[in-house]
Structures are given as C-alpha cells and as structure tokens.
Amino acid sequence: MKLIRFTFFVCCVVLGFTNVYGGPLLDKFRSNQQQKLQEFGKTNLGEFSGHIFYPFGGPDVTYPLLMFPEFKDLTLMGLEPAEAPESVEVKLDNGALSNLSSLYKRSFFITDQMVSGVRNVAALILKQLENLGATDITVKAIACRDNAVEFRFMLNGTERTIRYYKAGLDNSQIDIDFLKSLGPINVVFFKAASYLPHQKNFSKFRGFVLENVANFVQDSTGVPYEYLKDNFDLTLHGKYLKPYKFPGGFEQLSFRKYSEELNKQELSFSFGYGGGFVPTNILVAKRKSEVSF
C-alpha cells in the first residue's frame, strides 16, 4: 500500500489508499489509449515544458500527464468543489467511480454527472495520480481561496505541481486579475470544453487567452479556427468534419476546408467528443510573434 501525505496549511496527516480503481475500463484504457497518448505527446508536444492551463478540464489530470511529458505545472479549472477530505480514508463512492469510468471510456467527464455525483474532486484527482503511478504525493489547500487545492508529486522522475480551482469563466463571473495572477502560461489545453470558447458569453475569457498565451493544444471545442488562422502557425492532427451534436457547437466551414486540404489520417485514439461518430482532431497553434504576460 502506498502512503500519500496530505498537507493542509500546517496540519499534516497520512492517507492510505485501500481501493485503487481498477476494472475492465481502466484495463482497456491502458491497453488501447495510454501508450498512444504518450507517443503522441513525445512526438508532438515535448517542447511544452512550462505551465499548462487546462480550463474547463475539471479534475482530468490523466490526459495532460500522458500527453505533456515535460510539463512542470498544470492549472485546472472547473465548477466542482475541491476541499480537504473529512477523514484519513479516501475512497471513491459509486458516483465518483461512475465519473472516473466516463473519463477512461469517453476521454472526458460528463458535466451533468459531475454535478450530481461528485462532492470533492480532490479524491478523483488523487485516484488518477495513483493509477498513473505517481509517488511522494502531497496536497495542501491553497490559502486565501475557497475550493482550491495544490498537488505535488513525482512522476517519471520529475517533480510536478497541479493546482485545481473552482472558478466560473463566463463573462459574468470571470476574474481577469485572478487569471493574470496564475503567472506565465506556456500553453492552453482544451478538450471536451463544451464549445464554451465559441460562445459570446465567454468572449472575455477567449480574449484573455488569445492576448496572453502563445500556444494552444485543442480539439474543435476550443478557440475557433477563425481566431487562430492568421496569427498562429497551425498543425492539425486528425481530421475536422463537423462538430459533435452538442448545444452551442457551430460548424466551422473554414476549418473543415483547411482540414480537407490537408487530408490527414484519422487519429488512432479518442480525444474529446464524438468518438466513433465524428473524426477526432487535435490542433496545435503556435503564435507567430511573442506575447508578454
């Protein structure tokens, strides 16, 4: 049994995991997805070694940890609460297990299920770290902010830090000063982002990342192609045909034309919405000129 130390401000306790999540879905993910994600990351994303910002990612640490082999810091944001556990025994109840199953099966958490089935995303994050083989895990509440947790751990010989914040990013809730306080961001990562960066109600957030971040790695739910095509060097992996049937997603005709001209092969792994129904794609965008945060 691995021991995981929790640090909450100055108070420390030791937690033991007694029920590492397993089962056929995790086994299938490991055999069909994990190595492909790692190989894709090593080949295409190894240059991104700094701070990864994953808005709308919720508690998904599995995909960025597999795809960005060199990152040191990851910032996650979602709408689910994250607090210190009430006891030293961290176990996933049926609702949390169902959500974790969705990540391994579909490549994303389902928002409606998260709302009804997860009381504390810290446990979900810890379980993923355990399943990935992370060691020396310490966790502390982030001072002066509710529902904010920091994780430090070792993985593949590298010390890494993950910070999760519960935060709304729509125009009525976004706190630009808080986003700026996160420090320089090397890359923004979008996967299964509910097409929120497409929406008028998220225009302030979209403007913030376009102004302050040099690199994007995303599926078609991220920043629309039209905002990237002129000022970024683009590399498309996979194909874009149309949006998966999802409220708020609109058809990007210019992106489809760009994809058709490239005529790339489809990706061999799931990434975001529509697996089996629409082609999967990952767009890597690198700004042509420097930005100053």
Image: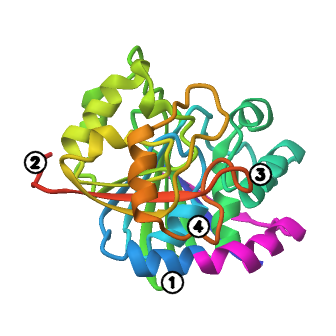
Q: Which mark is residue 203?
A: none
Q: Is residue 278 visible?
A: yes
Residue 252 position, x and y percent, is 45, 38
The secondary structure type at the circle numbered 4 is loop
Lateral position of residue 101 relative to residue 146, left or right: right
Q: How far apart in space, not on screen, are marks 4 and 3 (Cα)?
A: 22 Å
Q: Are marks 1 and 2 in contact (CB under 8 Å)?
A: no
Q: Residue shown at 31%/70% (left/top)?
A: 49
Upstream in sequence: badge 4 or badge 1: 1
- Amino acid type, callout 1: Asn
- Amino acid type, callout 4: Glu
Q: How far apart in space, not on screen, are marks 3 and 2 (Cα)?
A: 38 Å
Upstream in sequence: badge 4 or badge 2: 4
Instruction: Please tell me how crowded label 4 is: few (under 14), some (14-19), or many (20+) other residues with Cα within 10 Å.
Output: few
List the residue tagged with mark 3: 102
List the residue tagged with mark 4: 266
Residue 147 position, x and y percent, is 53, 35
Residue stretch in magenta: 10-36
List the residue tagged with mark 2: 292
Residue 75 position, x and y percent, is 42, 50
Q: Residue shown at 28%/28% (left/top)?
A: 176
Quadrant (top left/top right/bottom left/bottom right) for the C terminus: top left
Q: Nearer the viewer, residue 111 or 162?
A: 111
